[in-house]
Amino acid sequence: MDSSFADQNESPPSLAMTISADGLGVIGYLVVDRTVGGSASGGTRFARDVSIAELTGLARSMTYKWAFLNVPMGGAKAGVFAYPRQGCCKRSQLMEAFGRSISPLIQQKVYYPGLDLGTRLKDLQAIMKGAGSTLAGEHFDSSYATALTVFETIRQVSIFHRWDLRGLRVALEGFGKVTSSVAEMLQNAGAIVVGVSTREGTITSNNGFDVQQLMLLNELFGDDFVHHAIGSEVMSPRHLYSLEVDLLIPGLRPWAINESNVDDIKARWIVPVSDAPATGTAEAKLIERKVLFVPDFVSNCGGVLSMAMRKHDFDLDDVAQLISTTFAETVFKMLSESSRRGEYFAQFARSLAWRNQLNLAASETSSIGTGIKASQLIINKDWGGIKQRIAYEAHRRQSQLNGPIRKSALARYAEMTLGAVAGQMDL
């Protein structure tokens, strides 16, 4: 492992702020881990126990995620306190106050906020309103894209190791939009969901749950649905980690896998939905036991990828296509190359992503910067000005989803992002 990567693991974030508002006191935090071209991006979460330590770990995960995708953006994370009674302040007013407090960073494009745990589109709109700005472009739910990269990662691991997804026994932590979608994809592939946990407890079924039934219960009762699953005894949330399963999917808060439960884990591989799912010490123990641990920035990067592609006017179908092709090929190549080199996958992936981060940070400009349109991705193919305008108009109207112009733009984007990551392994 090179020294620059080792030094990065110990380095503090570039900026860590406590956010206060008049009449409300401290209302949250903002952590900027790294910037690229002066900018960083990451979601804003809304939780009672949000802490600057948690956000620091999550911001570092965002840095890795952008770097893994080879997108020129640094990592950041923000958090707003969610109290039952936040003074006399409505939720929208609280978000606006948070936006006002960090308005210089938003106005100067140092920090681009996004959705995260506990927040919704209205919250993000209120933050931007408080900052004196508006949301750029159309925002779509990125949870499905995240589920796609989690599932595709699982599929590529199974292909590489020749493990059949049919009959694979799976335990999932959390059952929100992403995790429930992953569960449905796995069930459709023949896997068996034998354990599910929420903050209210863990339920198990040796023969496997009907995922659609759990989704319906979750829609009706939220996290409390575990108490309504017929024939299942509700045990503590911690019980999930000790289940006899093949695959464990962490999906809640950071560092859920830690020194208190890592020795209980019996799964042979772990693919997270959540960011920063394990402490460094716990991960080291898993690696020592030869448990395959996939880093979060690989498996759950779909949401970030969809955000980046949306800025280039691509839609969710384009995102899904790239995930099933270039992303899948990159993950398989990483598995192959780390095995060939005799390196643990998680360590190899981090080293690769950090090398990308250093390369991105060293360049002040990038041909896939946030302000360009997808049609411009094919300009360097020596097309004339008229064809460029035709390409832009066709793409803008979304009129040729499978046409040659759109395919060229998507292929070029794939080449400049994950394709460049795959190329790093050939050096």
Image: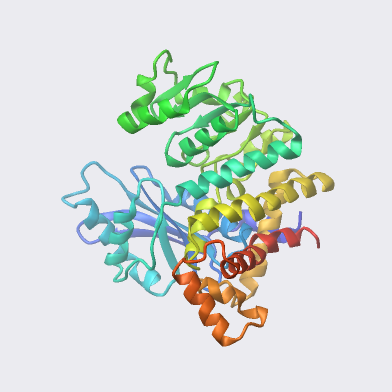
As rendered, which of 398 and 182 lies closer to the eye? 398
- Does residue 381 appear in the picture of this structure? yes
Residue at 57 percent of width and 68 percent of height: 72
Residue at 66 percent of width and 57 percent of height: 353
Residue 111 location in percent, x, y? Answer: 43, 66
| Residue 4 horizontal side relative to residue 75, left or right | right
As rendered, which of 57 and 189 lies closer to the eye? 189
Residue 333 location in percent, x, y? Answer: 75, 50
As rendered, which of 199 and 18 lies closer to the eye? 199
Please identify the quarter of the rendering in which residue 319 is found: bottom right
- Does residue 59 appear in the picture of this structure? no
Residue at 47 percent of width and 41 percent of height: 178
| Residue 247 horizontal side relative to residue 49, left or right | right
Disc tally is 0
Residue at 51 percent of width and 42 percent of height: 274
As rendered, which of 298 and 415 lies closer to the eye? 415
From the image, which quarter does the C terminus lie in?
Answer: bottom right
| Residue 178 horizontal side relative to residue 225, left or right | right
Q: How is the image coloured?
A: rainbow
